[in-house]
Image (cartoon, helix red, strand yellow):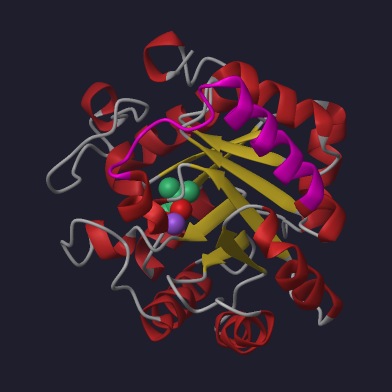
Amino acid sequence: MKKVTINTLLAWKQEGRKFASATAYDASFAQLFEQQEMPVLLVGDSLGMVLQGNSDTLSVSLSDIAYHTKAVRAGSPNCFLMADMPFMTYATPEQACLSAAEVIKAGANMVKLEGGDWLVDTIKMLTERAVPVCAHLGLTPQSVNVFGGYKVQGRDQAAADKMLADAIALEKAGAQIILLECVPASLAEKITQSVHVPVIGIGAGNVTDGQILVMHDMFGISANYMPRFSKNYLTDTGDMRKAVSRYIAEVESGEFPGPDHTFN
Ligand code: KIV
Ligand code: NA
């Protein structure tokens, strides 16, 4: 696979070409994904759930993310690699810079932060210091105790307007990718059309520029729980490599996510 950069993704958005991505946590799967030409990988703090068996992402540490980022980078030298900043590692702009340095030094091309317009100064400071940022909006799992559970976000008009305004403010602050989790497709479409940077969705309909799945959900092997918006690609293909290339093909054609995997 040719090296994928932020410019590749921006060009795809401008061409209207949809792209797939997945989480990855180790070198072997990262290599398998690169062999199937998965352009974007994320070392998600979902590793607290799918690798560590916890019920949320809150106990994941910065060194956990750095450890898995090194492994994924070793397996996939050419993907565009994002890595999550864990809970409370970016509470202030200064702390965010020091935390992000660990993730970037481990091999990530971009860090992902959860939150709305309170992140404006943090994103400015990171991007001025050469750390590219993905801003994660909608269902931000680090706020599970504030939300009182994992619920679709942006359903009423006020919340939808706020999310759109946040996305625009975060792009202005310097965010180079927006990620939307569990939002109605109509809102995801509005946000995707309103910002110039690529928008990646999960549980946000087939209207975003890119899609992402937690790899364990793609293979139907997640401990405990399978979100409604995810799809098990292993059942029909019976082979991990075929499952991955089917997922990529269905994202590129717009077939996934279909109505069963979308919130309205
Ligand atoms: O941690 C994660 O895997 C994520 C994706 C679900 C977007 O943040
Ligand atoms: Na995450």
Q: Is residue 56 visible?
A: yes
Is residue 187 in the magenta section? Answer: no
- Residue 113, relative to residue 199: is it above or below? below
Hey, which residue is sitting farthest top in the picture? Answer: 259
In percent of the image, x 56 and y 87: which residue is there?
102
Q: Is residue 129 left or right of residue 42?
A: right
Q: Using the image as rendered, state which of residue 255 and residue 161 is in the foreground.
A: 161
Is residue 156 in the magenta section? Answer: yes
Hey, which residue is sitting farthest front in the picture? Answer: 158
Q: Is residue 12 left or right of residue 156?
A: right
Q: Is residue 209 visible?
A: no
Q: Is residue 114 left or right of residue 88?
A: right
In percent of the image, x 67 and y 69: which residue is there?
109
Q: What stretch is highlighted in magenta?
A: 148-169
- In terms of image quadrants, where is residue 55? bottom left
Coordinates of residue 57 in the picture (x, y in percent) = 32, 62
Coordinates of residue 51 in the picture (x, y in percent) = 23, 64
- In terms of image quadrants, where is residue 193? top right
Q: In this view, does 117 lie to the left or right of 35?
A: right
Hey, which residue is sitting farthest left in the picture? Answer: 224
Coordinates of residue 144 in the picture (x, y in percent) = 34, 51
Q: Using the image as rendered, state which of residue 3 and residue 97 is in the foreground.
A: 97
Q: How many labels does the image show?
A: 0
- Residue 158, relative to residue 61: is it above or below? above
Coordinates of residue 190 in the picture (x, y in percent) = 73, 23
